[in-house]
Image (cartoon, grey):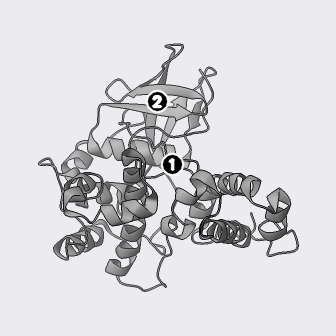
């Protein structure tokens, strides 16, 4: 974890675990086996920093997923790592350039989710999403509202408070959910959704946003949940923008017809403002994302993993 305080380290930490598991699946089906993985992707003599380690794993995955006819099973049907990794432009780039890069990744996330829903290969979904018969269905996942909510949930706006979702344990302490889960729950709060199903390891829970309770589907045990403001003191920073710039940039891409307009009559900002004054004992929570073996889709709405204790 050298240089873990660098810009972009949070994204690497967020995706590294899933990428490592995906690489393990690929290695078991590759001719060189796991030994080949350690030689190529986990060489201890290589760059020891966080970015170096993560990049070697991504390069390993990229090379395997691009081999024509490689017998990699599900791994071959998933997006190349670069499709889901945000590569922010240089410092001083325009808000449109920054939001455009977030949009590129968001569209790919939505494409993957849509591919899973439709039961088609990711590469096929990239083509089919642009067909006239699929435009409306894809726009329900990928539009101005869902994109803005995703950016706000990921704490891209400099003038919106960062939030962390937590669950109360037996000893009375509050345990924070994982990054992806907390982001997904914050998206649900902004949308004003009433219920959510989340998967934590092998446990499945339903969270009632109005009552702020998490219920275990199997045991029916309930635990309180809450949403609190997180003090990150990240300031502006590369990749973070004022909300007005985010909204203006989104409108720009809608006008270019790069992004579908909002699909609901009730706009997202109204939902966000309705809950903007939540205290520690209030908040909302819903969507969490269950995705294929490569890991989480931050834009999904269903289930997600989080470091919460069972029960």
Residue denoted by label 2:
225
So how many labels did they put on this image?
2
Q: Position of residue 196 (x, y in %)?
A: 38, 32
Quarter of the rendering containing residue 310: top right
Q: Residue at x 61, y 52 (%)?
A: 73
In front: 196, or 91? 196
Considering only order in the chain, which callout, 2 or 1, is on the residue closer to the N terminus? Answer: 1
Contact flag, marks 1 and 2 (Cβ < 8 Å): no
- Residue found at the far front of this picture: 69
Residue denoted by label 1:
180
From the viewer's perspective, is residue 169 above or below residue 259?
Answer: above
SS type, badge 2: strand
Quarter of the rendering containing residue 127: bottom left
- Closer to the eye: label 1 or 2: 1
Quadrant the C terminus occupies? top right
Mark 2 residue crowding within 10 angstroms, few (<14) / some (14–19) / many (20+)? many
Q: CA distance from mark 1 to mark 2?
A: 16 Å
Q: Residue at x 51, y 36 (%)?
A: 166
Quadrant the N terminus occupies? bottom right
Q: Position of residue 37 (x, y in %)?
A: 79, 63
SS type, badge 1: helix
- Residue found at the far left of this picture: 265
Q: Residue at x 58, y 61 (%)?
A: 10
- Residue found at the far right of this picture: 45
In front: 17, or 121? 121
């Amino acid at each position: 974890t050298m240089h873990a305080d660098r810009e972009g380290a949070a994204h690497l930490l967020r995706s590294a675990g899933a990428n490592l598991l995906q690489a393990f699946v690929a290695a078991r089906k590759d001719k060189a086996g796991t030994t080949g993985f350690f030689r190529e992707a986990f060489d201890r003599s290589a760059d020891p920093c966080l970015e170096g380690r993560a990049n070697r794993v991504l390069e390993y995955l990229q090379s395997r997923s691009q081999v024509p006819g490689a017998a990699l099973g599900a791994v071959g049907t998933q997006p190349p790592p670069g499709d889901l990794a945000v590569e922010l432009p240089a410092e001083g780039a325009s808000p449109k350039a920054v939001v455009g890069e977030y949009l590129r990744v968001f569209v790919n996330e939505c494409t993957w989710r849509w591919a899973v829903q439709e039961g088609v290969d990711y590469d096929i979904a990239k083509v089919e999403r642009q067909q006239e018969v699929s435009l409306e269905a894809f726009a329900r996942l990928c539009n101005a509202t869902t994109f803005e909510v995703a950016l706000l949930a990921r704490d891209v706006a400099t003038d919106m408070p960062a939030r962390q979702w937590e669950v109360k344990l037996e000893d009375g302490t509050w345990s924070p959910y994982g990054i992806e889960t907390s982001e997904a729950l914050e998206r649900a709060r902004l949308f004003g959704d009433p219920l959510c199903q989340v998967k934590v390891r092998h446990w499945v829970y339903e969270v009632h946003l109005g009552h702020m309770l998490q219920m275990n589907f199997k045991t029916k045990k309930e635990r309180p949940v809450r949403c609190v403001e997180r003090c990150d003191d990240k300031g502006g920073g590369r990749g973070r923008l004022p909300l007005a710039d985010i909204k203006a940039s989104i409108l720009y891409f809608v006008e270019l017809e790069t992004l579908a307009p909002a699909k609901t009559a009730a706009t997202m900002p109204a939902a966000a403002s309705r809950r903007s004054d939540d205290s520690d004992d209030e908040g909302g929570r819903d969507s969490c994302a269950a995705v294929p073996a490569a890991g989480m889709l931050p834009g999904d709405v269903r289930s997600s993993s989080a470091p919460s204790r069972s029960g």
